[in-house]
Amino acid sequence: MATAVVPRVFKNYINGEWLESASGRAFENRNPADNDELVGMFPSSTAEDVDAAVDAAAEAFKSWRLVPAPKRAEILYRAAETLVRRKEDLAQDMTREMGKPLAETRGDVQEAIDMTYYMAGEGRRLFGQTTPSELRNKFAMTVRQPLGVCAMITPWNFPMAIPSWKIMPALICGNTVVIKPAQDTPLSTYSLAHILTEAGLPRGVVNVVNGSGPEVGASLIHRQGVSAVSFTGSTEVGRLVNEACAPTFKPCHLEMGGKNILIIMDDANLELAVEGAVWAGFGTTGQRCTAASRVAVHHKVYHQFVEKFVARAKSLRVGNGLDAETEMGPCINEAQLQKVMEYVEIGRNEGAHLAAGGHHLTAGAWSRGWFHEPTVFTGCTPQMRIAQEEIFGPVVAVMPVENFDQAVEVANGVVYGLSASIYTRDVNRAFQAMRDLHTGIVYVNAPTIGAEVHLPFGGTKQTGNGHREAGSAAIEFYSEWKTLYLDYSDRLQRAQMES
Ligand code: NAD
């Protein structure tokens, strides 16, 4: 007799306790490569749960802000060590909930490890300035202050890396946290919270509330008592976050959509450029904010590039990310797959040439997941929708360009500005590109993906709102300056009025 498999049930984490949602309802987290596999059940939370989490974080802030930063760092170091020890399990879990191949989920956990160690190191820096006062017997300096309760809303494509990019700098600066992970990938944030707790994080310092964007996310960004919001996701939702924060001038950090480009010049190492285009276009099934969904190729090497790129795209092995042979996993969910299919239709109708892929994969084991072929459109023009709009799937638009100037014009001719790359051996061209590409990140002779945690990460135009994640830039967002003057003259000294 078959025994029913009881799904694992996960809870919210509020004030150091694992709690059901006030609603009593739950949602499913299923494997996008195999919909028969239920990864777990997570609470469908409500505004009431958000209230409890924000109150807990506000209470915990009173004591956490007073813990010396090097002591906060000790907790982060311990958490990083656990992440290292558990890396393989965490990567397996992540592949089951998110779909990307194991090599990539190992990289995602590694990014969380790197960020945790990096921010732990910041615990002994967090430098301010001392500077001479313009007055005698007066001392002037600056210190960093935490902001308070930081709300975080994260997407599903980097289930552990992105939460760690927000949580770790917030904590080291002395803030407390309420995080709402994406509904498609709640397990990785659950594990991260568990690891931080095991490492000795006091109750209430990190709180996790699961649930939908319109319910939990919206409550969080409007909730009084939240001092700052950090959001990564689509530009549409980012705009809502921005609007919600505006009336009370709440600092908000937005990392949003992208339409990144590879420029391939006629002097490029073509083999290298093809490998870069394959990795940037189809790595993570094209579901990276830095994925290159546009390739502009100098007309002199256009046909050569297209031939090689199309052949490589066609050869990619699509499948379950747990299988060591798999090079590209599924789309995250049915809606994302539908969106990809709609854009394939749009591309065809716009007159682009479908050179590779274009189909939903339904045979055999693929039928249990949201698989789509790696897809290449050639002969695209810069104004086509497939060359302008973020698809967030395995679809790449290739277009010929006459020269470097046109390539830069095409690159900058979109509303987004996250990442761009140029393949060239001409050092002058490389420097011109670094100067003229209007994106937050530029690569030379490397694909548009590959951020490292100690450098700022973020985009221009409708990709970001001027803040940056990672590196010392993250410390800038999660702290604010306090300027201190100490007068030891024992008399009233008036700035700008003493002779
Ligand atoms: P999304 O905007 O749909 O969701 C992001 C998060 O916002 C989720 O947790 C979601 O539940 C929440 N949300 C949805 N509606 C909300 C609302 N009304 N109020 C508050 N929160 C709400 O994005 P996604 O589909 O999870 O991720 C894909 C998008 O994320 C792409 O546009 C991609 O470019 C972007 N992204 C950007 C970066 C970056 O660093 N620039 C990194 C990764 C992903």
Image (cartoon, rainbow, N blue to C red):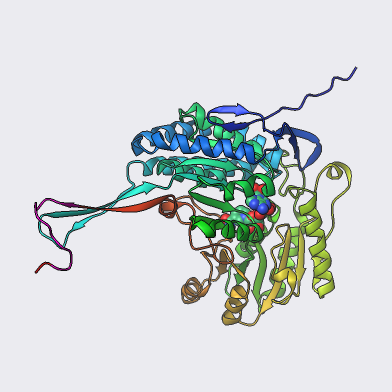
Task: Tell me residue 333's x, y (percent).
Answer: 77, 48
Which quadrant of the figure has residue 422?
bottom right
Residue 103 in the image: above or below residue 264: above
In the rendered structure, the answer to whether residue 379 lies left or right of residue 111 reads right
Compare residues 267 and 31 and report the one nearer the observer. Answer: 31
Residue 460 in the image: above or below residue 231: below
The answer to whether any part of residue 397 appears in the image is: yes
In the rendered structure, the answer to whether residue 121 lies left or right of residue 132 reads right
Residue 193 in the image: above or below residue 436: above
**Farthest residue in the front direction?**
492
Query: At 36% from the left edge and 47% from the top edge, which residue is drawn?
Result: 145
Task: Tell me residue 273's x, y (percent).
Answer: 62, 64
Which quadrant of the figure has residue 276?
bottom right
**Farthest residue in the right direction?**
1
User: Magenta segment, which residues?
Assistant: 486-497
The answer to whether any part of residue 155 appears in the image is: no
Compare residues 452 and 204 and report the one nearer the observer. Answer: 204
Name the quadrant of the N terminus.
top right
Task: Tell me residue 5's x, y (percent).
Answer: 80, 24
Magenta segment includes 122? no
Task: Tell me residue 118's x, y (percent).
Answer: 42, 44
In the rendered structure, the answer to whether residue 259 lies left or right of residue 457 reads right
Count of labels shown?
Answer: 0
**Farthest residue in the top direction?**
1
Name the quadrant of the C terminus.
bottom left
Dominant secondary structure, magenta = loop
Query: At 60% from the left edge and 48% from the top edge, which residue is drawn?
Result: 154
Compare residues 52 and 195 and report the one nearer the observer. Answer: 52
